[in-house]
Image: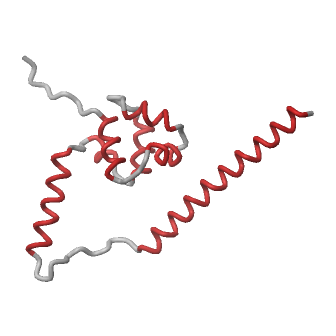
């Protein structure tokens, strides 16, 4: 009998984190520039190459280690400790925003702008291709 721990299934971890972020496969695919089918395949893979893992971590706004070490138990413990802190605090709310919400909003606007520009360019490329076919 082997006492060696089975490596974590990275694809499942990505799927769980993506779901916790409220993100669909298509949104993650767009964020890293691949198809939804590629995300589906990655989520079914036990291992993923490091470069792709870094891209996915960035898109999910988590660290690569968070993906590698993700477990349902850790999430439950996190939320339980969070609830205990709220109940034990004097005012019931000791959460402080660690980022500027306007900066986050501007990041989202910029990401949407980039996505729109890519989609627009793809449509322009299609028009050029179709015009060539007609001629």
Screen quadrant of the N terminus: top left
User: Which residue shows up at 10% across the image and 19% down it?
Assistant: 2
Q: Quadrant of residue 65?
A: top left
Residue farthest toward the top in the current orientation of the protein:
1
- Residue 36 in percent (x, y) is at 50, 38
Q: Is residue 30 above or below residue 106?
A: above
- Residue 54 in percent (x, y) is at 41, 44
The number of numbered discs placed on residues in the rendered structure image is: 0
Q: Is residue 29 left or right of residue 82?
A: right
- Residue 19 in percent (x, y) is at 34, 48
User: Which residue shows up at 9% across the image and 24% down it?
Assistant: 3
User: Which residue shows up at 44% across the image and 43% down it?
Assistant: 25
Q: Is residue 112 left or right of residue 62?
A: right
Q: Is residue 104 above or below residue 112?
A: below
Q: Nearer the viewer, residue 78 or 64?
A: 78
Q: Nearer the viewer, residue 40 or 70?
A: 40
- Residue 110 in percent (x, y) is at 57, 63
User: Which residue shows up at 76% across the image and 41% down it?
Assistant: 126
Q: Is residue 133 above or below residue 91?
A: above
């Amino acid at each position: 009998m082997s006492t060696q721990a089975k490596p974590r299934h990275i694809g499942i971890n990505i799927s769980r984190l993506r779901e916790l972020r409220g993100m669909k496969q298509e949104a993650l695919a767009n964020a890293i520039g691949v198809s939804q089918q590629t995300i589906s395949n990655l989520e079914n893979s036990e291992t993923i190459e490091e470069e792709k893992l870094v891209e996915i971590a960035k898109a999910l706004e988590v660290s690569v280690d968070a993906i590698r070490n993700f477990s349902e138990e850790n999430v439950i413990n996190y939320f339980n400790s969070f609830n205990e802190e709220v109940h034990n605090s004097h005012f019931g709310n000791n959460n402080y925003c660690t980022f500027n919400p306007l900066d986050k909003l501007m990041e989202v606007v910029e990401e949407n702008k980039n996505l729109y520009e890519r989609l627009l360019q793809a449509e322009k490329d299609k028009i050029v291709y179709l015009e060539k076919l007609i001629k």
